[in-house]
Image (cartoon, rainbow, N blue to C red):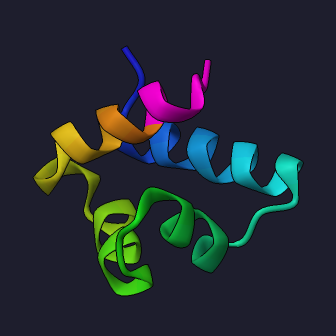
Amino acid sequence: MATSKETVQKILDYFNAQGWLIPDVASALNVSEQYLRRVLNNPEQHPKQITNIIAHYKIR
């Protein structure tokens, strides 16, 4: 089982590999940039949102 920090790093690595910045992803997910940063900075408090991001982008 991956830790929350490893999971967030996988998500960020995926975004970087695609050439996407946080504002681009926030816009695509229809959430504010501030909210997305809060979710990524505190994954323990937002497990459902982290799961939704992983599922939406099919991150493995």
Is 20 drawn above or below residue 32 in the view shown?
A: above
Tell me the residue at 39%/62% (across/down): 40
On the image, the x and y values in percent for residue 10 come to: 61, 39
Q: Out of 2 and 30, give the one closest to the viewer.
A: 30
Magenta-drawn segment: 54-60
Q: Is residue 44 left or right of residue 57?
A: left
Is 22 drawn above or below residue 34 in the view shown?
A: above
- For the N terminus, the image quarter is top left
Q: Out of 24 and 39, give the one closest to the viewer.
A: 24
Q: Is residue 21 left or right of residue 1?
A: right
On the image, the x and y values in percent for residue 56 come to: 48, 32
Q: Residue furthest left?
A: 45
Picture quadrant where residue 16 is located:
bottom right
Tell me the residue at 37%/33% (across/down): 3
Q: Is residue 8 left or right of residue 23?
A: left
Q: Residue furthest bottom?
A: 34
- For the C terminus, the image quarter is top right
Total marks in image? 0
On the image, the x and y values in percent for residue 17 come to: 86, 47
Tell me the residue at 42%/23% (across/down): 2
Q: Out of 28 and 5, give the one closest to the viewer.
A: 28
On the image, the x and y values in percent for residue 55 come to: 44, 25
Q: Is residue 58 magenta?
A: yes
Q: Is residue 42 magenta?
A: no
Tell me the residue at 12%/55% (across/down): 45
Is 3 drawn above or below residue 31 in the view shown?
A: above
